[in-house]
Image: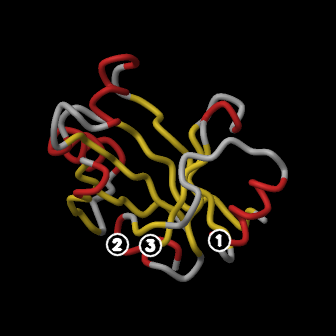
Amino acid sequence: MLDKINHVAIAVADLDAAIAHYKSRYQVEPESREVIETDGVEEAMLRVGDSYVQLIAPTGSDSTVARYLERNGEGLHHIGYEVADVSEALAHLKAAGARLIDNEPRRGGGGALVAFVHPKDGLGTLIELVGAGTAHGA
């Protein structure tokens, strides 16, 4: 079901500072940057080989990423796996008894179809399913 690692998301307090850090240390710049209103975050996608590092910063104190930063500080937030069909992947996971955050696919960054699986069902890691051929799933 999982085709490849689409991205690794890192929660940061200051997106501009994080971008500058990646540029100076690793010589990589964002391929895209956008605000995702529905998630209350601004993201920057940095291509690394065939996948991405996604830097995410909260746009307000009420976002889940803001709460994550309060509890954990900056660091690994989730892993995004590319799947051929997000709806089929969700149906499979639901039938297997997985704990889901999203019961239906929704639009994420770059217009990609995405859905999240609860960290309690991801061995302590928040999992994002990203539809193949959609934006960062291309």
Checking the image for residue 112, the label placed there is: 3
Within-10-Å neighbours for mark 3: few <14, some 14–19, many 20+: many
User: Is 120 positioned to the left or the right of 33 in the image?
Assistant: right
Type of amino acid at the residue the image marks with label 3: Ala
Q: CA distance from mark 3 to mark 1?
A: 13 Å
First in sequence: mark 3 or mark 1? 1
Residue 138: give x, y in percent of width and height: 52, 80
User: Is 74 positioned to the left or the right of 118 in the image?
Assistant: left
First in sequence: mark 2 or mark 1? 1
53 or 40, which is in the foreground? 40
Colouring convention used in this rendered image of the protein = secondary structure
Type of amino acid at the residue the image marks with label 1: Ser
Callouts 2 and 3 close, C-beta under 8 Å: yes
Q: Residue at x 34, y 72 (%)?
A: 110
- What residue is shown with label 1? 87
Q: Residue at x 23, y 47 (%)?
A: 19
Q: Secondary structure at mark 1?
A: helix
Type of amino acid at the residue the image marks with label 2: Gly
Q: Quadrant of residue 86?
A: bottom right
Q: CA distance from mark 2 to mark 3?
A: 5 Å
